[in-house]
Amino acid sequence: RYAEDFRADGMLFAKLLVSPMPHARVRSIDTSAALRMPGVKAILTADDLPVLPGGAERALTNEPLYAGEPILAVAAVDELTAADAI
């Protein structure tokens, strides 16, 4: 069995929205439509994460340095719902 085959009661699935361009700046993100979707439990942006000491890299950013850097995370009851919310 692979990690992908594992399922547990109450398990949530996460999907990331990644930056389509390098050296960008996220000015705002409207998550209201995604949060209203049935099955979407939470959405995290860089603004929701604490600032780490020493300038350590955070999991999400509002100023992506490269295309593909994560800017938003969605947690939902299944993978399809999480992907649709993205």
Image (spheres, grey):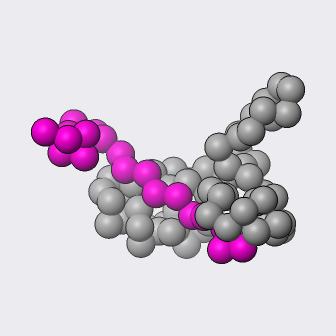
Instruction: Identify which residue, 58 or 77, lies in the foreground.
Output: 58
* Residue located at (41% from left, 67% from top): 83
- Left or right? Give the position of 4 relative to 45: left
* Residue located at (71% from left, 40% from top): 58
- Left or right? Give the position of 75 relative to 22: left
Q: Is 19 inside the magenta-drawn segment?
A: yes
* Residue located at (37% from left, 50% from top): 13
* The quadrant where residue 59 appears: top right
Q: Is 15 inside the magenta-drawn segment?
A: yes
What span is in magenta? 1-21
Residue 76 is situated, as x and y percent measured from the top left of the image, at 39, 54
Q: Is residue 12 above or below residue 51?
A: below
Report the number of discs: 0
Instruction: Identify which residue, 71 or 21, lies in the foreground.
Output: 21
Q: Is residue 33 above or below residue 45?
A: below
- Left or right? Give the position of 15 relative to 43: left
Q: Is residue 37 above or below residue 12?
A: below
Q: Residue furthest left?
A: 1
Q: Residue furthest top?
A: 53
* Residue located at (55% from left, 72% from top): 33
Q: Is residue 67 visible?
A: yes
Residue 38 is situated, as x and y percent measured from the top left of the image, at 37, 64
